[in-house]
Amino acid sequence: MSIQEVELVIVGSGPAGYTAAVYAARAGLAPVVLAGSVTAGGALMTTTEVENFPGFIDGIQGPDLMDAMRAQAERFGARIINDDAVSIDLQGAVKTIKTGNGEAYAARAVVLAMGSEYRKLGLPEEDRLSGHGISWCATCDGFFFREKQIAVVGGGDSAMEEALFLTRFASKVTIVHRRDEFRASKVMVDRVLADSKIEVAWNSEVAEILGEEQADGLRLKNTVDGSERVLDVTGAFIAIGHDPRSALVAEQVATDSDGYVKVEHPSTRTSLPGVFAAGDLVDHTYRQAITAAGTGCAAAQDAQQFLSSLIPSEQRSDLVLESAI
Amino acid sequence: MSIVNVTDETFEHEVLQSGLPVVVDIWATWCGPCKAIAPVLEDLAAEFSGRVKIVKVDADANPATVSAAGVTSIPTLGFYRAGERVDVLIGAHPRPVIAAKIKDLLS
């Protein structure tokens, strides 16, 4: 395996990764972006209308926004590669990243921007019924629930967005939420509560997904009085939050108890020199496209400053030679 | 071998009666992860050319195939040998995972 030596590798291709790529490319670092073999563009690739990214008066489709960010980074010389990081060695001055296609990159600076993945309910039958009525992607799978009754589990903006989108197909959408109020933004909550196709099962959590080959109902448990009932649905979309995708680096950089990579706020420096982190991999509070883009920008600048503070190795060996003379 | 589009009408002939093992990709234009795996499948179709046939079914236009396969999530890859579906892979998985499934189909 030959190792390609580069200045900066950015792992991840959501708003954080692509924004870091734009800034690093404009700084002349020619960053390599490992965008993922099938996940390029990140979480926004499966959303529809993004209404709160500044600059788009009428909103923009998530995939269009990400395609534009990618093209913008490429315009300035970023090398964006649709391949997965499968091992990341951050120890030492030169960091090595190996990919699923058998490539390897060595760089003195790395920006980690792997984002997050959907959180599962944690029920034993969940994997068996995933793709058989249980889904994490309304834009992909809503189509298959035409005129059916379905559930959305969750109480944040993602759950509201999925529920509203699914009303295009389903005859009825029930939002299952474990508390008595939503965490989502007011504009989304107002839209949901005004929609005649949407009902809410407050104070309810999913105790069991019913069905053998195909999901055919949810057993709900009331979080206040413990009572149970069966919700008659043919599908459920799970939107209960995300977990950071930090598995490849969690043994190397400091993380918090939930697996988020720790940084020295307000910088993006991690516990290892030359390693910076941005976006949802770090942020369990805001988790917006614009905040991820903001920290991606900061990570590129931190990486640039770090690289320029290093004495290039050739010059260093020259210095050694000179001092020897 | 390039990827052939299969419909409700041609599924029987192209998939179930195929002499070669077949990978059926059920996809749709509005599905982001389906678009993401499309180039990977093109690549694998070339790599396994002559040994495996890879075909696509547009979920929008072919409801009979979708419902017969019990599909409620896409992309769904069905792996067929001698007219029977022997394996299924639901969701957008990285290339090595899909390649391993194709190798299983051939063994």
Image: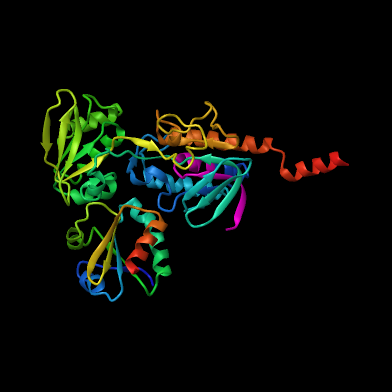
Residue A224 appears in the picture as rendered: yes
Residue most toward the right? A325
**Magenta-drawn stretch contains A214:** no
Nearest the eye: B62 or A220: A220
Q: Kindly identify the residue that appears in the image at 54 percent across and 56 percent down.
A: A103
Q: Looking at the figure, which quarter contains the N terminus of chain A? A: bottom right
Where on the picture, by quarter, is residue A2? bottom right
Nearest the eye: A73 or A10: A10
Q: How far from the left and from the top, in percent, is residue B60?
A: 23, 58
Q: How far from the left and from the top, in percent, is residue A28?
A: 63, 44
Residue A198 appears in the picture as rendered: no
Q: How far from the left and from the top, in percent, is residue B50?
A: 38, 75
Residue A128 position (above or below residue A219): below
Residue A184 position (above or below residue A136): above
Q: Is residue A18 left or right of residue A190?
A: right
Nearest the eye: A169 or A151: A151
Q: Is residue A108 left or right of residue A21?
A: right
Q: Is residue A163 left or right of residue A247?
A: left
Residue A72 position (above or below residue A223): below
Q: Kindly identify the residue that appears in the image at 28 percent across and 47 percent down.
A: A139
Residue range corresponding to the magenta coloring: A1-21
Q: How is the image coloured?
A: rainbow
Q: How far from the left and from the top, in percent, is residue A176?
A: 20, 33
Residue most toward the bottom? B19
Q: Kindly identify the residue that appears in the image at 85 percent across and 38 percent down.
A: A323
